[in-house]
Amino acid sequence: MATFDAMPCFGASINDIDTEYIKQEYLPKVIDGDILSTDTRDIKEQMAAIHLYDLTHDCPTNAAIILFGKNPQYFMHGAYVQYVHFAGKDRGSDIINERQIRGCICKMLPQLESFVRDAVITSRPVPIGMLQEKDVVNYPYLALRELLMNACMHRDYQSNMPIRLYQYEDRIEILNAGGLYGEARPENFPSVNDYRNPIVAEALRVLKYVNMFNRGIERVKKLMHDNGNPEPMFNVDKITAFEVIVRPTWSLNLIADEEKVTKSVTKQAGIINEILSFCLEPHSLAEIMEHVGLKHRSNTKQRYINP
């Protein structure tokens, strides 16, 4: 069966395609130079040979509109990336920044790469020793790039929902129309992969945006680990969408701090309960300190006796 990207885009014409980009940039990458130099066919026939044009209906395929269309959102309303930066940890918080990144894939992806690098990736100094610091980025650029390229490749272009790139105080969520496809299932993810848009996927491989080796998820995990981020969370149980959540580098420090506080509170409560049991009969402070193993008088009174 023909996939959606292979089907004709009814209502579109060759004028809706950036044919100059195809001639100058794409065809030389996908067709051998010697063959291309002797090819006397017109652009429609050349595009048809690589599944970008439907000669029977005399119109571009959906893949041609997605990849090289002058205004793909006219035909596929959700074919763009929506970025929102929230000040807090949920959508009810104030919006710091908002942007829609539109256009065909060959024009949109370079914009998306620059935007992520300039607006999403930030760094801050982290102490590594006495009077020494190093700059640590919140998210590894290559990991976010991989996730967004995969979102553009695997999304369901029949959906009106855009790719959502939502940044919160403590995480980034990427939500994409279209759940796992074909042979890919929740029980075999990410070992098994399949392509909802094989023509789009092949074009992204030719343009060096993806490699199609089914190693993207593992690569993202390694990049996140090497940068000091928690492991990304993939929600593959949604039927109509695919979601990934990544957390910044310093969230590990926040988790560690919370664990330290929790342990401290638990320890304090345990010692106080031990003191209360011991003092069912009157005892002096010295006897209490000896019983629970505390050595500093003022600290014992402040942290345990007074509470």
Image (cartoon, rainbow, N blue to C red):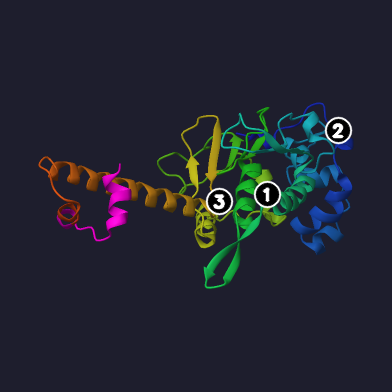
Per the image, is 110 magenta? no
Element on which disc 1 rests: helix
Check disc 1 and report the residue beneath it: 120
**In this rendering, is residue 132 above or below 110?**
below
Element on which disc 2 rests: loop
Distance from the alpha carbon under mark 3 to that under mark 2: 45 Å
Numbered range of the magenta stretch: 290-307
Q: How crowded is mark 2: few (under 14 residues within 10 Å), some or many (20 or more)?
A: some
Q: Quadrant of residue 160?
A: top right
Name the magenta segment's main secondary structure.
Answer: helix
Label 1 or label 2, whichever comes before in sequence order: 2
Whole-percent x, y for residue 131 in the image: 57, 72
Say which residue appears at 66% left-offset and 54% top-offset: 122
Whole-percent x, y for residue 93 in the image: 62, 32
Label 1 or label 3, whichever comes before in sequence order: 1
* Any part of residue 263 in sight: no
Q: Residue 13 carries which label?
A: 2
Q: How crowded is mark 3: few (under 14 residues within 10 Å), some or many (20 or more)?
A: many
Does the CB distance between marks 3 and 2 fall below 8 Å?
A: no
- Asked whether 34 or 197 is in front, the reply is 197
- In the visual, does 291 lie left or right of 200? left
Per the image, is 299 magenta? yes
- Asked whether 29 or 165 is in front, the reply is 165
Amino acid type at circle 2 is: Ser
Check disc 3 and report the residue beneath it: 248
Distance from the alpha carbon under mark 1 to that under mark 2: 37 Å
